[in-house]
Image (tube, grey):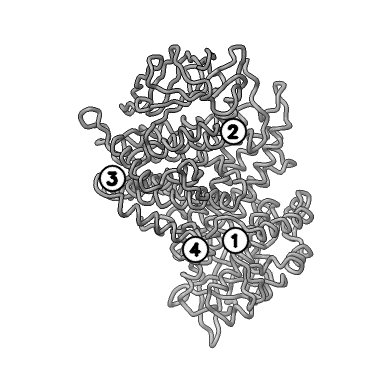
Amino acid sequence: MDFSFSEEQEELRKVVRSFLAAHSAETDVRRISEGAEGYDRQVWRRMAGELGLQGLAVPEEYGGAGFGYPELGVVFEEMGRALLCAPYFSSVALAAEVLLRSGDELAAKDLLPGICAGTTVATLALTEESGLWTEDGVSLSAARTGDGWTLSGVKTYVPDGHLADLLLVVARGQNGVSLFAVDATAPGLTRTRLPTLDQTREQARLEFEGTPARLIGSSGTAWPVIERALATAGILLAAEQVGSAASTLATAVEYAKARVQYGRPIGSFQGIKHLCADLLTELESARSAAYGGLWALQSGDEQEIRVAAALAQVYCSETFTRVAAGSIQVHGAIGFTWEHPAHLYFKRAKSTEVLLGSPAHHRELLAAALGL
Amino acid sequence: MMELQFGAEVEDFRDEVRTWLAEHLVGEFAEHRGVGGPTDGEAWEVRLAWDRELSAGGWLGLGWPREYGGRGLGLLEEIVFEYEYARSGAPYRATGNALDLLGPMLIAMGSEEQKQRFIPRILAVEELWGQGFSEPGAGSDLASVRTRAELDGDEWVLNGQKVWTTFGMQADWLYVLCRTDPDSTRHKGLSMLLVPTDQPGVEIRPIRSLAGQDEFTEVFFTDARTRADLVVGDVGQGWRTAMGTLGIERGATLLPAQLAYEREMDALLELARERGALTDPMHRRSLLDAWMSVRIMRTTNLRTVAELLQGRTPGAQATTAKLYASTNHQRMGHLAMQIEGAAGQIVADGYGLDVRQRSLLISLAETIYGGASEVQRNIIGEKVLGLPRDPKPL
């Protein structure tokens, strides 16, 4: 473990940052998030074709570039900064990760190359009406039909569920929880886009009525795979949260330098200065939590990964929310308007805070990992 | 648990440190594992003897030049040593102030004669030092120092008062920031003088802290004298000299402290388990948050160490770390006493504090010394975020 990013990783950061500056500026974010499509297909293809971002950390045998999690974390951080509107988290942090963890070599060889190439948008459909990210929360039923399977029930709060070409669905059969691949065009599948508080990230409700599905891995053994994939996703989401928080704090600080009241820039008043200093202190601590997670993933130490993932999700979720709210406070009334970008970050903070389960849920995962 | 990998080239050195500590951290020294702190004088005599043991083993001044008795080693070895030292739980070094602040200041800015005269005696633990910076009217606002020194022939004559000098009762020498240009104000006209305490013009009195201890002192100079050449850096440039040492202070002390907090956290979880506090939802949450804060301190410090080892200027986390650590350590102390419950209201005879009472009370100083939290926030706001300075003094 070297606990710092290499020159190559910093170089990757620059490349991604400049790509996103050109393709995910505030005007792009507003256009896409308020539009019907949810993402810009052309940008998505260029992310895969020119930069290889979708397959960055996928091994080469599955069509990826074979880089590590620190590299992927850098990409998520930059996407968080730019509030990129795209099914990247769902395709890469959730779907690709679940496939990689599934141990189903055939499925990985079939399905991962499309994700890496940017031709398949994929997601994980886990949560149901209860909104729980636990094994108990899975009730959608899987039934054996001849030599195949069909699914019946409802999934909701599925990130990019209506955009995805490939749905990885967690369902319950007679011998427990299994993972299935469902084609978006499969019969008996009804997808409804849900209007989201955070318009930069799409969600959908999926209804399955005897929908044919392909079993991934072996039947009844999926939960440890899901749990492990969620740990990775939690760490990558934490990196994204850190990037977003850093961006909105930087905007607030620039405003505090420029905005004059009582004849002085407001950032010269300790009321504002100390708020900004506290937010930076929290942000740097969140950075440690997220980066610690990336390095844990790289180390492959399973106990360390469980601990680091839970910590990163609790701390980065809560910090992003505090920083995003603090940024609105520093901006004053202008920060309360629809036109100002501060609310885009605040809403992203609120959605990511519970996207993979609430901080309370992750505190309990931490307690379990520590044996408390 | 993830650790910094130091690389094969220092493995021999690491073994040497571990072996020496295993052989020497025994008996009375081993009984005082984890004892002491920057402002904690507990078991002073044992710790001073331990410092001399370290000195005899050649473990003081690892990065200092060989010609003055140091080992001339690099930052990597220093960090490896501090890491292993903290892991062993060896007592906090009694002469930490001279080793961490004065020594590096002399090496950076002292004259050749000063280095030869003082550094070997610091390393031999023959002369003990106290810091004379703060005054009754100059705390966070150090530039308002009023203690005066005037040249009288080949000697400086000092008059004034210093306060909060840690371990002043034991000090043989003081390094004193004083005003050598009587017409100057603020940062100008200050000089850093080295002053012997064993003279009629220096009176040192203990100040009892709220923990019932006498580590702090106040120092009165009444026509106290010191040689004209005992100025560190140039006359009138004392502010620069002083700021150099404060920079060192912030960087050096966090790694050992954080390992000590990890041990405290382990003990707190043990106590919580015994008292059944883990099943109380509020305590459970607070304990998890405390655990997280200590883990975050660890990663933050490792980030800084890794950047230093790569020869890079550490990022913002190096500046925010002190505020985060001191605030969260205090919070942990409050939590520990809440979990201790009713028994925490009682002390032993002679105001004898248990480990949790002591840790909490002493932690109240951590958000004050080495730059109070409010000063830290100004530094973070202005130096890191580039926010405009506060209004000028009236």
* Residue B133 in sight in this render: no
Residue type at numbered disc 2: Ile
Q: Nearer the viewer, mark 1 or mark 4?
A: 4
Residue nearest the observer in this picture, B51 or A221: B51
Q: Residue at x 47, y 14 (%)?
A: B160
Sequence-first tag of 3 and 2: 3
Residue position marked by numbered label 2 in the rendering: B379
Distance between mark 3 and mark 2 Cα atoms? 39 Å
Q: Which mark is residue B8?
A: 4
Q: Position of residue A207 (x, y in %)?
A: 60, 68
Distance between mark 4 and mark 3 Cα atoms? 30 Å
Sequence-first tag of 2 and 4: 4
Q: Residues within 10 Å of mark 3 (few under 14, many from 20)?
A: some
Q: Position of residue A140 (x, y in %)?
A: 51, 70
Q: Name the quadrant containing residue B196.
A: top left
User: Do callouts 2 and 4 mark residues in contact (Cβ within 8 Å)?
Assistant: no
Labels 1 and 4 in the same subunit: no
Q: Position of residue B184 (x, y in %)?
A: 62, 15
The chain that hosts pointer 3 is B
Q: Which mark is residue B29?
A: 3
The chain that hosts pointer 2 is B
Distance between mark 2 and mark 4 Cα atoms? 38 Å
Q: Position of residue B12 (x, y in %)?
A: 44, 60
Distance between mark 1 and mark 3 Cα atoms? 43 Å
Dividing the image into 4 quarters, which one contains the C terminus of chain B? Answer: top right
Dividing the image into 4 quarters, which one contains the N terminus of chain B? Answer: bottom left
Relative to B393, does residue B247 appear above or below in the rendering? below
User: Do callouts 4 and 3 mark residues in contact (Cβ within 8 Å)?
Assistant: no
Q: Residue at x 55, y 54 (%)?
A: A290
Residue type at numbered disc 1: Pro
Q: Which mark is residue A70?
A: 1
